[in-house]
Image (cartoon, grey):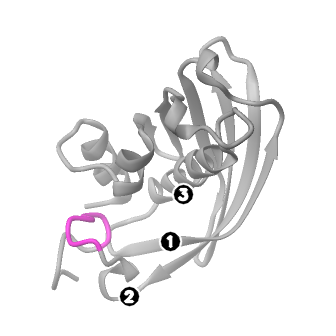
Amino acid sequence: MSGLEFLRSMGRGELPGPPIAELMGFGVAEVEEGRVVFECVPAEYHYNPIGTVHGGLACALFDSAMGCAVHSELPAGVGYTTVELKVNFLRPIGIRTGRVLCEGKTIHVGGRIATAEARLLDEGGRLYGHATTTCMIFRGENGGNDRKDAGPVGEGEGAS
């Protein structure tokens, strides 16, 4: 299963989402080749000690959206990992912000390196932050993925 097919299956609920998304309360909203959108409704459990949403939530959204955008362009048996993440925070996120959308788009997907960018917006289009990433692309047994249900890089244990 290609990365795009895997992500679309996840978006339709046919495959489970990544455990980090469940833990942090976000999920896939849109998937197309080279573009993935995650959504999240900020809650108090996302707050840091100063009373705003912790920057780690935005970073997780950025990393997920950009990584999955890269993933959407990869064939079966090919994996990736983030090697660099650059984030710019523009304004704080709070409960009153409402639903936020993080749109990741690929910039370049080569044989060994991929780059992508993302924007974090509220439903009114107000920008809360933006980010870029560099990912390493790798081939090999199970694409380096340890998840047994990970599909796109091996369809489970023992797949090639």
Q: For mark 1, what is the residue?
A: 80
Q: Who's the residue at 16% across and 85% down the image? A: 158
Q: Nearer the viewer, residue 120 or 40?
A: 40
- Predominant secondary structure in magenta? loop
Residue beneath the point at 34% across and 56% down: 19
**Residue 122 occupies quadrant:** top right
Q: State left or right for residue 40 relative to residue 117.
A: left
| 44 up-or-down from 104: above or below | above
Seen at 44% across and 53% down, the residue is: 72
Quadrant of res 97: top right
The quarter of the image holding the N terminus is: bottom left
Position of residue 117 relative to residue 67, above or below, is: above
Q: Three-letter amino acid code at disc 3?
A: Gly
Judge the density around disc 2: few (<14), some (14-19), many (≥20) Cα neighbours within 10 Å.
Answer: few
Q: Secondary structure at mark 3?
A: helix
Residue visible at 21% across and 72% down? 148
Give neighbour class at mark 1: few <14, some 14-19, many 20+ (Cα, 10 Å).
Answer: many
SS at mark 1 in the image: strand
Disc 1 marks which amino acid? Tyr
User: What's the CA distance linking mark 3 and mark 2?
Assistant: 18 Å
Q: Which residue bears the numbered disc 3? A: 67
The image position of residue 48, as x and y in percent, is 66, 43
Label 1–label 3 contact, CB within 8 A: yes
- Residue 140 shows which numbered tag? 2
User: Which residue type carries mark 2?
Assistant: Gly
Q: Which of the two discs, 3 and 2, labels the residue nearer the N terminus?
A: 3
The disc label shown at residue 106, or none: none
Q: Which residues are magenta?
A: 147-153
User: First in sequence: mark 2 or mark 1?
Assistant: 1
